[in-house]
């Protein structure tokens, strides 16, 4: 394998995985919170919104990257919105043709993907400055990271609020559902718990790295003496 190809592979992998964890749109960057809190009362809704967001994010960012040298700077935001709105319209009709129940459950939040700061922000901050390959990898990683966050919230809310997952009953008939989890306050509660967990894991990892570095420094001092 040529040296250039070997050096590009880790870089492409890092670009793709950044949105999954290190730069997760919801748990780290706190983007797209409106649909995150509004539609995550079930796993199905979360997956549908995640899939729609991935499609719009990847397609719109790829087109912006391909046309980045031809879009005048003065009208770039307007152009990006038109491109994003085109793909959102496609998603809107696709979901409507697949399932009216799902379409009604997601409501206006399908159309509101147009103003999702995650998609517009990536178009202006990344797609407009990078080649199409990196842009697609970054958009796909961000989209999957966004979907991961939606499913995390939707799974907990559906499990505690209805005692089921993906429509299958998990708890017995004696389980008393926490109805608040299916309401907007439940979204804030579950999001806060996930953020607390991930911040604790991050601090724990940082503490371990500091302890490891201190141990290495201590061992070096002993060797020098």
Image: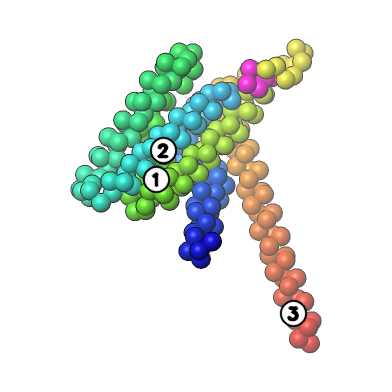
Q: CA distance from mark 1 to mark 3?
A: 45 Å
- Image height check: is 61 above or below 109? below
Task: Provide residue 155's location: percent of width, then percent of height.
Answer: 63, 28
In the picture, the disc for residue 122 is 1
Which comes before the other along the chain, label 2 or label 3? 2
Task: Provide residue 222's location: percent of width, then percent of height.
Answer: 79, 81
Q: Residue at x 49, y 60 (%)?
A: 5
In the image, the segment drawn in magenta is: 161-167
Which comes before the other along the chain, label 1 or label 3? 1
Work out which quarter of the rendered image holds the N terminus and state it. bottom right
Q: Nearer the viewer, residue 165 or 93?
A: 93
In the picture, the disc for residue 57 is 2
Q: What residue is disc 3 on?
A: 220
Which comes before the other along the chain, label 2 or label 1? 2
The kind of secondary structure element at disc 2 is helix
Q: Residue at x 59, y 38 (%)?
A: 192
């Amino acid at each position: 394998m040529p040296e250039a190809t070997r050096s590009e592979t880790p870089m492409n992998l890092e670009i793709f995985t950044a949105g999954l964890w290190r730069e997760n749109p919801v748990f780290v960057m706190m983007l797209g919170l409106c649909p995150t809190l509004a539609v995550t009362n079930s796993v199905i809704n979360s997956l549908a919104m995640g899939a729609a967001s991935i499609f719009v994010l990847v397609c719109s960012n790829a087109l912006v990257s391909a046309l980045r040298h031809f879009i005048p700077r003065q009208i770039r935001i307007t152009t990006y919105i038109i491109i994003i709105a085109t793909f959102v319209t496609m998603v809107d009709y696709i979901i409507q043709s697949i399932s009216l129940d799902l379409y009604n459950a997601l409501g206006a939040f399908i159309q509101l993907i147009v103003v999702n700061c995650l998609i517009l922000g990536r178009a202006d901050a990344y797609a407009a400055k990078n080649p199409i390959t990196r842009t697609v990898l970054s958009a796909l990683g961000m989209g999957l990271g966004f979907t991961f966050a939606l499913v995390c919230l939707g799974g907990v809310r559906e499990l505690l609020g209805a005692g089921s997952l993906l429509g299958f009953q998990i708890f017995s008939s004696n389980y008393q559902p926490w109805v608040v989890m299916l309401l907007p306050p439940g979204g804030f509660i579950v999001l806060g718990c996930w953020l607390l967990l991930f911040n604790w894991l991050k601090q724990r990892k940082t503490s371990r790295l500091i302890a490891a570095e201190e141990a290495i420094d201590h061992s070096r001092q002993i060797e020098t003496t």
